[in-house]
Image (cartoon, helix red, strand yellow):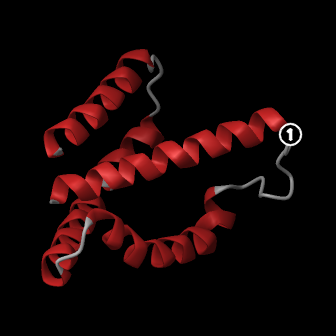
Amino acid sequence: MQVLALAVVSAGVAVATVTDLEFNLFGALIAIAWIVPSAVNKILWSNLQQQGNWTALALMWRTTPVTIFFLLALMPWLDPPGVLLFQWNMNNSSAILISAILGFLLQWSGALALG
């Protein structure tokens, strides 16, 4: 199961990498800066999962409220136009819903990979 989860994530990264033809220095610096917090996050998730003997979904259930809190706190700075100025039509809402589902699956595969 872990191999399948990692294969799906790797395929997604490969497709995104091959189809992205633009280089943005700011984006590259943010990606590099994100390596350490991401590694710490995975280590903490692994420790929590082993200490509590939780399944991947139980781990997500325990950590998601904290994640949502920080996301809501940082949203005004990360999304300058803001939620209220966003054009909430069917196409945009569908894209956000699909992105949320894919994000959930990505987090789930990461939790499964931690085992």
User: Quarter holding the C terminus?
Assistant: bottom left
Q: Give the crowd class for mark 1: few <14, some 14-19, many >=20 residues within 10 Å.
A: few
* Camera-nearest residue between 110 and 69: 110
User: Quarter holding the N terminus?
Assistant: top left
Q: Toward which corner of the image does residue 72 lie, by quadrant?
A: bottom right
Given the current orientation, which residue lies at the most extreme bottom position?
A: 52
Q: Toward which corner of the image does residue 80 lie, by quadrant?
A: bottom right
Q: Position of residue 91 (x, y in %)?
A: 78, 32
Left or right placement of residue 97 versus residue 3 in this view: right
Left or right placement of residue 43 versus residue 84 in this view: left
**Image point 53% across, 46% down: which residue?**
101
Q: Position of residue 2 (x, y in %)?
A: 16, 46
Q: Is residue 114 above or below residue 28?
A: below
Q: Position of residue 73 (x, y in %)?
A: 61, 75
Residue at the spot of label 1 = 89
Q: Amino acid at mark 1?
A: Asn
**Image point 46% across, 52% down: which residue?**
104
Q: Is residue 28 above or below residue 113?
A: above
Left or right placement of residue 85 versus residue 79 in this view: right
**Image point 45% across, 21% down: which residue?**
20
Q: Position of residue 21 (x, y in %)?
A: 45, 16
Q: Is residue 89 above or below residue 40?
A: above
| Picture mark count | 1
Element type at marker 1? loop
Q: Toward which corner of the image does residue 83 lie, by quadrant?
A: bottom right
Left or right placement of residue 78 versus residue 87 in this view: left
* Camera-nearest residue between 115 and 42: 115
